[in-house]
């Protein structure tokens, strides 16, 4: 396998993983009702997209019924598995979140290696000039 094939394969994986993350975001929203303490995944992109875009963040929505304004607020989560609902609905959601976390970890590894390779190529071209 030459370098061009390796780069193409790695870039294809990152693209496919990003597409799958978009699908899983929709599955998470469909798997739970809109209610207090719902855990949602959000994908965001920078204004100047990077190789790692879209990035994943987790938020738990909270309802504050005593407030007359701004009744709902989203709290950022570092560990979404800890905040998932229990029971039948939670089992399906747990499976999806585990898949997202594993895919995100693999994708981050690919992005890190691709970025390092790109940086090495840039440095090498500067030395050749």
Image (cartoon, helix red, strand yellow):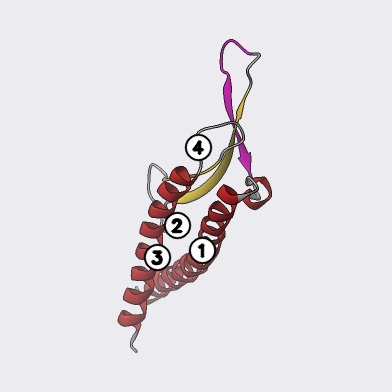
Q: Earlier in the sequence, mark 2 or mark 1?
A: 2
Front residue of 108/49: it is 108
Label 2 SS? loop
Q: Earlier in the sequence, mark 4 or mark 3?
A: 3
Question: In the image, what residue occupies the spot 42% across and 44% down?
Answer: 46
Q: What residue is pinned by disc 1? A: 108
Q: Earlier in the sequence, mark 1 or mark 4?
A: 4
Mark 1: few/some/many CA within 10 Å (<14, 14-19, 20+) = some
Question: In the image, what residue occupies the spot 36% across and 58% down?
Answer: 19
Q: Spatial distance from mark 4 to mark 3, Cα to Cα?
A: 30 Å
Examine the rendered structure and indicate whether residue 14 appears above or below residue 71.
below
Quarter in which the N terminus is drawn: bottom left
Residue 92 visible in the snapshot:
yes
- Report whether 101 appears left or right of 27: right
In percent of width and height, residue 7 lies at: 35, 75
Front residue of 109/128: it is 109
Q: What residue is pinned by disc 2? A: 52
């Amino acid at each position: 396998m030459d370098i061009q094939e390796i780069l193409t394969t790695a870039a294809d994986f990152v693209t496919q993983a990003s597409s799958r993350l978009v699908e899983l975001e929709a599955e998470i929203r469909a798997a739970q009702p809109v209610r207090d303490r719902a855990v949602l995944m959000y994908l965001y992109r920078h204004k100047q997209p990077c190789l790692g875009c879209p990035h994943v963040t987790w938020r738990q929505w909270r309802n504050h019924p005593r407030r007359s304004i701004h009744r709902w607020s989203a709290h950022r989560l570092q560990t979404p598995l800890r905040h998932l609902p229990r029971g039948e609905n939670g089992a399906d959601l747990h499976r999806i979140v585990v898949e997202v976390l594993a895919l995100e970890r693999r994708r981050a590894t690919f992005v890190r290696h691709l970025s390092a390779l790109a940086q090495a190529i840039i440095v090498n071209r500067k030395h050749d000039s």
